[in-house]
Image (spheres, rainbow, N blue to C red):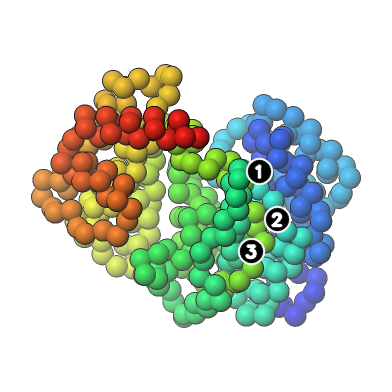
Amino acid sequence: MINYKNNRTLISIIIPVYNASQDLPRCIESVLSQDFDLFELILINDGSGDNSLEICNRYSQQDDRIKVINKNNEGVSTARNNGLKISKGDFVCFIDADDWVDNNYLSSLRNNIIKYEADLVISNVKRHYPNRIVKNQAFQNLLLESKSFSPDDFFINNDFVLGNHIFGKLFKKTIIEQNKIGFDRNLKNGEDLIFGLEYGLDCKKIIFTNDYTYNYNQQSDSSVTQKYFKDYYHHLKNTKDAYFKIVEKYTPVSEEEKLYQYFRVAAKAIFEEGKISADRPFKNRYHSIKSILEKSEIQNFTKHYKLPKENDSKFFLFIRKLAFRNQSLLLTSFLTLYFKLNSSKS
């Protein structure tokens, strides 16, 4: 049990590193500039092909609070799990190598977890786009408390309050260890969400702060220019299945709800498949979209259920309507026009 009044509580900071040489120094410097200095910084070089390892080693030689793990590339989940295994802190937080934190990041998280004797502290995030900074609309000054949380407790106005990212949070190491919580290496998308949900369900008290002390590096101002994600539907569905597996320990999930959620992520994947690139001509994108709509679970939903009313942008509502009507060719044509128009603006 943690003595909250003990000023010597240690925080472990875990940063997976993969080809991050351009932004890594800024990230490390922001940690070393903290006004709370009782921390260990664990850098896991995940098989980088650039000089990221050299940067990690250079900083570790300058500060004995820094530990470096060098390993073959196995993905961010394995890297974080390796960091957790060697961490010695009472608390744990995760930072992405291309992001950075304000100098009161650790003290803010620590002060709140001590003040409220909480199991999890969640701070706000500043998203840095090329030409603007956006502060996320989080649940400020929110306190969740329960002897036993269920997944439904983490939804407010249909928003998942724990968020789908791992940064901007302070975790208790004892909860992670006692409940054997880790990152699922089989998930390529949504591993943060699943980790956060599993952890949250083992908490008694969760606090959301007003502080904007984490800086997220949003490299692109538009989803149009972001890199194409291959097999996106497959990865999104895997995350949904992992989510359902957790939820069904607490409450049944109907077949209709599962199929509807698969359909929603299918529409999201169709948007991804519609992205234009030199190696993905119209024909390839059309067949990719068509193959998603032909999935048995998508066919099952569109044939046996109605598309419910949804509160979303007109754009994505239109995408879902076309998908529900199995309009592969029209979807591909519409998305081609959309991406061409938006790329000409950027």
The total number of labels drawn is 3
Instruction: Give the mark nearest the N terminus, 2 or 3.
Output: 2
Q: Where is residue 158 in the image (x, y as percent from the top left)?
A: 35, 66
Q: Residue 98 carries which label?
A: 1
Distance of label 1 from label 2 (alpha carbons): 11 Å
Q: Residue at x 79, y 36 (%)?
A: 55
- Determine whether 152 is above or below 100 in the image: below
On the image, numbered disc 2 is attached to which residue? 101
Q: Where is residue 215 in the image (x, y as percent from the top left)?
A: 65, 54
Is residue 1 among what the camera can see? no
The residue at the far right in this view is: 62
Q: Position of residue 42 (x, y in %)?
A: 72, 49
- Determine whether 3 is above or below 81 in the image: below
Distance of label 2 from label 3 (alpha carbons): 9 Å
Secondary structure state at the residue bearing disc 3: strand
Is 302 on the left-hand or right-hand side of 15?
left
Q: Which mark is residue 212?
A: 3
**Which three-letter amino acid code belongs to the residue tagged 2?**
Val
